């Protein structure tokens, strides 16, 4: 199972772009990179998933370099409601492989 | 699509009693479900892997006789905390695999044992 490393916490002002980087040096060929958001007392919520290069959806972008040993979640123009813990998960989820959580990144958006 | 329903959202029980938590995949079939436990300000800790029609696989250090898991159908897995004690108080979360995205998580269950 690929181990992930993320910053423990980040602060950002409202309206700014936030980039959270995750390191996963031992990512396997079949592994996908998935980011989740978790609010207190709620289950994690899917944000975005990718395998390589760049993926964009209505809430975020995911940048993955060619070697896939890291990935960056980009949140454009954050608001106070984006204050949450963000987890980077790496694994062969489509292959029903179990995935363990790292500590996640606590993002605090400041007014 | 890809909704996982978890009930109850919160439960308070007396020490020594048992509590059942349900995890349902509403719009897809989930042959594999996972159960996690999360203590305050900590990450999710995987407790067990639940496979439909077979025995659950527990992570090291998780007591299988205390945390009973049943996955009797493709849409339902249950976690029963038997003889609950205050140290079992935690936030329990299930997830299911069955779509392209991989994991879909339930909303969690806050268990308080008094």
Image (tube, rainbow, N blue to C red):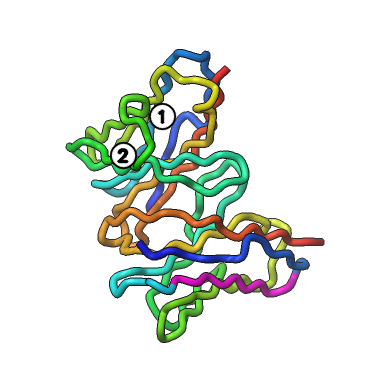
**A108 lies above or below A33:** above
Side of B26 relative to A16 (left or right) = left
Per the picture, the main secondary structure of the magenta-coloured stretch is strand
Q: Residue B63: percent from the left, percent from the top? A: 35, 30
Q: Disc 1 designates what residue?
A: B21
At x 56%, y 72%, the residue is A21
Answer whether residue A59 is magenta in the image. no
- Which percent across, then down, holds residue B19? 43, 21
Q: How many marks are shown on the rendered structure?
A: 2
Under circle 1, the secondary element is strand
Disc 1 chain ID: B
Is B97 placed left or right of A46 in the picture? left
Residue B112 in sight from this viewpoint: yes
Q: Is residue B94 above or below residue A111?
A: above
Q: Residues within 10 Å of mark 1 (few under 14, many from 20)?
A: many
* Mark 2, residue position: B58
Q: Which residues are magenta?
A: A15-24
């Amino acid at each position: 199972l690929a181990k992930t490393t993320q910053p423990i916490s980040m602060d950002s002002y409202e309206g700014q772009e936030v980039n959270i980087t995750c390191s996963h040096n031992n990512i396997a060929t079949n592994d996908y990179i998935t980011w989740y958001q978790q609010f207190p007392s709620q289950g994690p919520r899917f944000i975005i998933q990718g395998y390589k290069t760049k993926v964009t959806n209505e809430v975020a972008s995911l940048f993955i370099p060619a070697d896939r040993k890291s990935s960056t979640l980009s949140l454009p123009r954050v608001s106070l409601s984006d204050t949450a813990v963000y987890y980077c998960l790496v694994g062969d989820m489509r292959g029903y492989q179990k995935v363990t959580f790292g500590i996640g990144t606590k993002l605090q958006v400041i007014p | 699509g890809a909704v996982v329903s978890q009930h109850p959202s919160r439960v308070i029980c007396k020490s020594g009693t048992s509590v059942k938590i349900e995890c349902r995949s509403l719009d897809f079939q989930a042959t594999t479900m996972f159960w996690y436990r999360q203590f305050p300000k900590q990450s999710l800790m995987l407790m067990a892997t639940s496979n439909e029609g077979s025995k659950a696989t527990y992570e090291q250090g998780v007591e299988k006789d205390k945390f009973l898991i049943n996955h009797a159908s493709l849409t339902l897995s249950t976690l029963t905390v038997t003889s609950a004690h205050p140290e079992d108080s935690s936030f329990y979360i299930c997830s299911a695999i069955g779509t392209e995205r991989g994991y879909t998580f339930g909303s969690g269950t806050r268990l308080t044992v008094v």
